[in-house]
Image (cartoon, grey):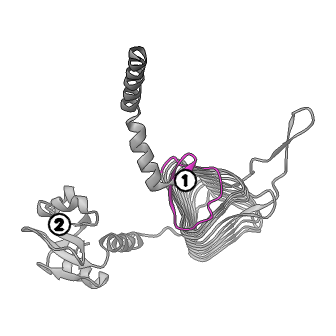
Amino acid sequence: MEFTAQQIADFLHGTVFGNPSASVGDISKIEEGKPGTLTFLSNPKYTPHIYSTEASIVLVNNDFEPEGEIKATLIKVENAYNALASLLNLVEQSKPQKRGIDSLAAISPSAKIGEFAYVGAYAVIGDNVQIGDGAKIYPQAYIGDNVKIGDNVSIYAGAKIYQDCVIGNNVTIHSGTVVGADGFGFAPDDKGVYHKIPQIGNVLIEDDVEIGANSCIDRATMGSTIIRRGVKIDNLIQIAHNVEVGKNTVIAAQSGIAGSTKIGEGCVLGGQVGVSGHLHIADGSKFGAQSGVQSSVKIPNQALQGSPVFSYMGFMKSTSIFQKLPELQKKINELEKEIERLKIKD
């Protein structure tokens, strides 16, 4: 299906600069643009490509002013990246939607499945499960007893939702992720032998959450491990028992949060960030990749990095000094030798 620049601009509430009849049927990167495709310019470092791209239509921000000739038709919008996301959502929604229950799915008679839902082959749905309207449970997914799943949820192939967990509306859980496995709770006796502490809580995931592939969110020892509304979790994430992640927080790959830590709203955790247990992290905290968070962060909206973390600017200055340590060491050695020579002369 093809769309003209004018049709796209009308949908995005943008303005066309160039040929309003230019049409596209696919999307491309700006540096790899081909005729008949749409691309976008959001990051300034890609600006040179807009003058050479072969794409037919380019989404740009309203404040973009060309400094040379551009062959493509431009559509100016408030935010080019968000506009592209809207178009991609439209494309996704236009695809055929899976419906119905596969004859090879194993579903408890006590389970309740909403209208227009999909359950794939070899999926297992336990006792007293409730699945909302339009939900999609892909092949080989496992939904444990007493789980509640909201409307328009997608549980991809091989994901596991343990018993008693609650999933809100419009949640996406990708393949291989485990929600509700036991928290890491063991107590040593007087001989140093560790004994398991039963984990009798659950996991509560609110609306509009997305969880990447092969992540683990452990059930609470008591109460709930809570993922608040709008949280986005990357692949390969570990969230321990009784953690609470505040709404609209994003967590990048290979990060881990230890038990009972409370992450505030609107936080950003870069890749491989490690957060110790029983901490409180203020709203709007941003941690650079590979940061180690060993104490609570009380001041909101800070950018932090390092292990242990401190201010981002301080980290960058320290890194600059660290890179010069061999040179500084050499100068110190030379100064020490000079001092010794002066002592001998005296």
Q: Which residues are magenta?
A: 289-310
The answer to whether 186 is drawn above or below residue 337 in the figure is below
Instruction: Give the residue type at disc 2.
Output: Gly
Q: Position of residue 345 (x, y in %)?
A: 38, 15
Residue projecting furthest to the left: 69
Tell which circle, 1 or 2, labels the residue nearer the N-terminal end.
2
Judging depth in this view, the residue of 139 and 286 nearest the camera is 286
Q: Residue 216 vs residue 315: left or right?
A: right
Q: Position of residue 91 (x, y in %)?
A: 35, 71
Judging depth in this view, the residue of 282 and 156 nearest the camera is 282
Q: Residue 30 vs residue 241: left or right?
A: left
When asked about the image quadrant of residue 299, the answer is bottom right
Q: Position of residue 4 (x, y in %)?
A: 20, 78
Residue labelled with disc 2: 36
Number of labels in the image equals 2
Residue occupying the point 76% across, 58% down: 220
When asked about the image quadrant of residue 307, the answer is top right
Q: Position of residue 67 (x, y in %)?
A: 10, 68
Residue labelled with disc 1: 175
Other residues around mark 2 within 10 Å, as few (<14) / some (14–19) / many (≥20): some
Residue occupying the point 39% across, 20% down: 342
Q: CA distance from mark 1 to mark 2?
A: 34 Å
Residue projecting furthest to the top: 344
At mark 1, the secondary structure is loop
Instruction: Give the residue type at disc 1.
Output: Ser
Other residues around mark 1 within 10 Å, as few (<14) / some (14–19) / many (≥20): many
